[in-house]
Image: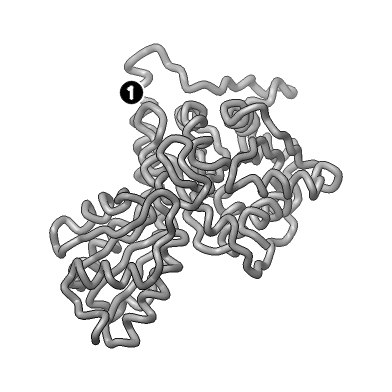
Amino acid sequence: MKGNEAIAHAAIRCGCDGYFGYPITPQSEILETLAAEKPWETTGMVVLQAESEVASINMIYGGGGAGKRVMTSSSSPGVALMQEGIAYMAGAEVPGLIVNVQRGGPGLGTIQPSQGDYFQATRGGGNGDYYVLVLAPSSVQEMADFVDLAFELSFKYRIPAMILSDGVVGQVMEKVVLPPFKPRRTEEEILRECPWASTGRKGNRPINVITSLELKPEAMEKHNLHLQEKYKTIRANEVRYEEIQTEDAEYLIVAFGSAARIAQKAISDLRSKGIRVGLLRPITLWPFPTERIQQLSEQVKGILSFEINAGQMVEDVRLAVEGRCPVAHYGKMGGIVPTPDELIQALAKDFQINALNS
């Protein structure tokens, strides 16, 4: 099935309470699949097409604030419209899942694939000092697997989580093993697991107020310091990445999502010519695998950040490397997906490797 379809099926199976979204290419199959599967008849999951992306993210804010497993999905310009609501959720420490199947930009851009939302996802596109936990799948299997993982981490740390996919992974069709069915939590379980949730007065339970508003500067700073401590904990415990043939690598490619798939083919071709190149694929874009890239920078002669954009992740790579070795970037824009041969030529040019004639 398509990556988008896998996300929809995984959401039903992992006990999601509600989906609120709005159609936009190239992610509309998520909403369409949920509508076709009618989970409200089997699991009780609510599926609603909201009137806009702004409405859908605020529905997530409300559902998450009540302790429910709720999610939305969109593509790049749609997620841009959600940034105010995401900032509210981060400030109020409300969990929830946002799926972004990226397309080319800026603005309305194109409906073709891109990875131009790296900054929007990892830097916090709204106001204030906050982060969103970002998972970057590179296969249909990971599209399915990351739904439950995103919910788990989102509730563990009370932080919005984002699955940052792209038009390639969302539209490609591959075999997938769907997760087993997980029952939706009962109201009693929600009350026990989410004592902070706003669920109304039940017995002697106090009424919790969910808000990101604080008028007293001292109290606002105290809350921000609490958030920063939480982010430190996430950085220490939740960094995820995959390494391919880095043990003896002389050169390193750093790539995520569909770009990592292209990089794997390029590495295979380069290795067949005796050029030792490895891949580090960040799975969490935030928190970023800074420490591991720093370690590898002491081993290799150069690092190429390969992204389908003008160069965004490369800034985090350079911060990790701190000048230990040369760092270059290669990417395409406007919805054009680079080929493995183009990546090989870029690596050869940037690091003076005779990759084509070896």
As displayed, is residue 88 above or below residue 357?
A: above
Under circle 1, the secondary element is helix
> In the drawing, does residue 330 fall left or right of residue 89?
left
Most foreground residue, 173 or 289: 173
What is the quadrant of the C terminus in the image?
A: bottom left
Q: Quadrant of residue 323?
A: bottom left
Residue positioned 19% across, 77% down in the render: 353
What is the quadrant of the N terminus in the image?
A: bottom right
Most foreground residue, 352 or 73: 352
Q: How is the image coloured?
A: one colour
* Amino acid on which the number 1 mark rests in the picture: Glu
Q: Quadrant of residue 181?
A: bottom right
Q: Quadrant of residue 225?
A: top left
As displayed, is residue 293 above or below residue 186?
A: below
Tell which residue pokes out farthest to the top in this image: 215
Residue 41 location in percent, x, y? Answer: 86, 44
As displayed, is residue 103 above or below residue 279?
A: above
Residue 224 location in percent, x, y? Answer: 36, 28
Residue positioned 36% across, 27% down in the render: 128
> In the drawing, does residue 34 fall left or right of residue 251?
right
Residue 122 location in percent, x, y? Answer: 38, 43
As displayed, is residue 230 above or below residue 88?
A: below
Q: Which residue is mark 1?
A: 221
Residue positioned 51% across, 28% down in the render: 85
Q: Is residue 94 visible?
A: yes
Q: Is residue 197 visible?
A: no
